[in-house]
Image (tube, rainbow, N blue to C red):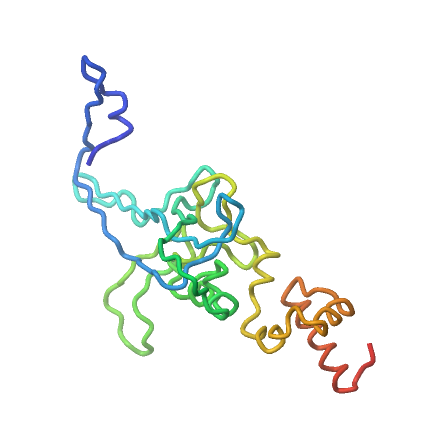
């Protein structure tokens, strides 16, 4: 493989770059591919758009004697987080039909929490299958100690960014934005009346639901009022 850093300093008499190769043998494999339900994040135009994996490099280095020097290592970026990348992208699949409501509002992966909320493949532990009472004889995926998350996790519920995003001003959805998206499938029954006079009156009386907890509180008050249990 070409060592691009060393090659920049290696020129011939005419100033042309001479490619320098790295010692040893380099193999690159792809072990994690997911195309469905892309994550949403903030792109360079400060708009919400799809975010997809860039180079999620997890490296293993074997020396000339066959001894492992580094095993399953995601190196850190200058930001102090895992140097495996998630970035906004234009997937060239533009169409008039929008994503289904539930593909965002019900799916924690879309918000950035990872497949099934990040429990699909937490990589901090070796995976040997999950069938109970089965003798496990071989580790299928060695532990990746420095990245205790699913590879589809961009941000935790506590707001910690888990992967590097490679350009200025791009980021995961922040806490306020994630709370506005996450409604766990409860939105359609009421929000079909959005932008009606009745809706505007309800919003004026009760305010806005900025978080999931505030939304639950307001729903509880509205239902109790309808049932005659309270007057406010």
Residue 37: image location, x then y, percent: 41, 63
Q: Residue furthest top?
A: 13
Residue 38: image location, x then y, percent: 41, 59
Q: Which quarter of the rendering shows the N terminus? A: top left
Q: Nearer the viewer, residue 132 or 90?
A: 90
Residue at position x 79%, y 85% in the image: 229
Is 158 above or below relative to 131? above
Q: Nearer the viewer, residue 29 or 227?
A: 227
Give the quarter of the image for residue 137: bottom left
Q: Nearer the viewer, residue 199 or 108?
A: 199
Residue at position x 76%, y 69% in the image: 206
Q: Is residue 149 left or right of residue 229?
A: left
Residue at position x 50%, y 45% in the image: 170
Residue 111: image location, x then y, percent: 50, 60
Q: Which quarter of the rendering shows the C terminus? A: bottom right
Q: Is residue 50 left or right of residue 159?
A: left
Residue 56: image location, x then y, percent: 35, 49
**Callout count:** 0
Q: Nearer the viewer, residue 65 or 44?
A: 44
Give the quarter of the image for residue 130: bottom left
Residue at position x 68%, y 67% in the image: 214
Q: Is residue 22 left or right of residue 103?
A: left
Q: Residue furthest right?
A: 231
């Amino acid at each position: 493989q070409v060592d691009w850093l060393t090659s920049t300093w290696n020129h011939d008499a005419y100033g042309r770059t001479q490619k320098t190769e790295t010692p040893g043998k380099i193999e690159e494999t792809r072990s994690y591919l997911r195309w469905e339900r892309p994550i949403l994040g903030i792109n360079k135009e400060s708009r919400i758009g799809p975010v997809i994996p860039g180079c999620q490099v997890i490296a293993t280095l074997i020396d000339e004697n066959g001894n492992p020097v580094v095993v399953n290592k995601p190196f850190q970026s200058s930001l102090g987080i895992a140097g495996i990348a998630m970035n906004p992208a234009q997937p060239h699949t533009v169409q008039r039909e929008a994503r289904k409501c539930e593909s965002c509002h019900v799916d924690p992966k879309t918000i950035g929490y990872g497949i099934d909320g990040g429990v699909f493949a937490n990589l901090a532990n070796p995976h040997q299958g999950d069938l109970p009472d089965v003798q496990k004889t071989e580790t299928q995926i060695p532990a990746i100690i420095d990245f205790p998350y699913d590879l589809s996790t961009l941000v935790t519920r506590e707001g910690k960014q888990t992967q590097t995003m490679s350009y200025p001003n791009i980021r995961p959805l922040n806490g306020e934005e994630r709370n506005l998206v996450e409604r766990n499938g409860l939105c359609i029954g009421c929000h079909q009346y959005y932008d009606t006079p009745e809706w505007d009156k309800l919003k004026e009386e009760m305010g806005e639901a900025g978080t999931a907890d505030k939304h639950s509180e307001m729903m509880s008050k509205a239902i109790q009022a309808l049932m005659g249990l309270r007057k406010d």
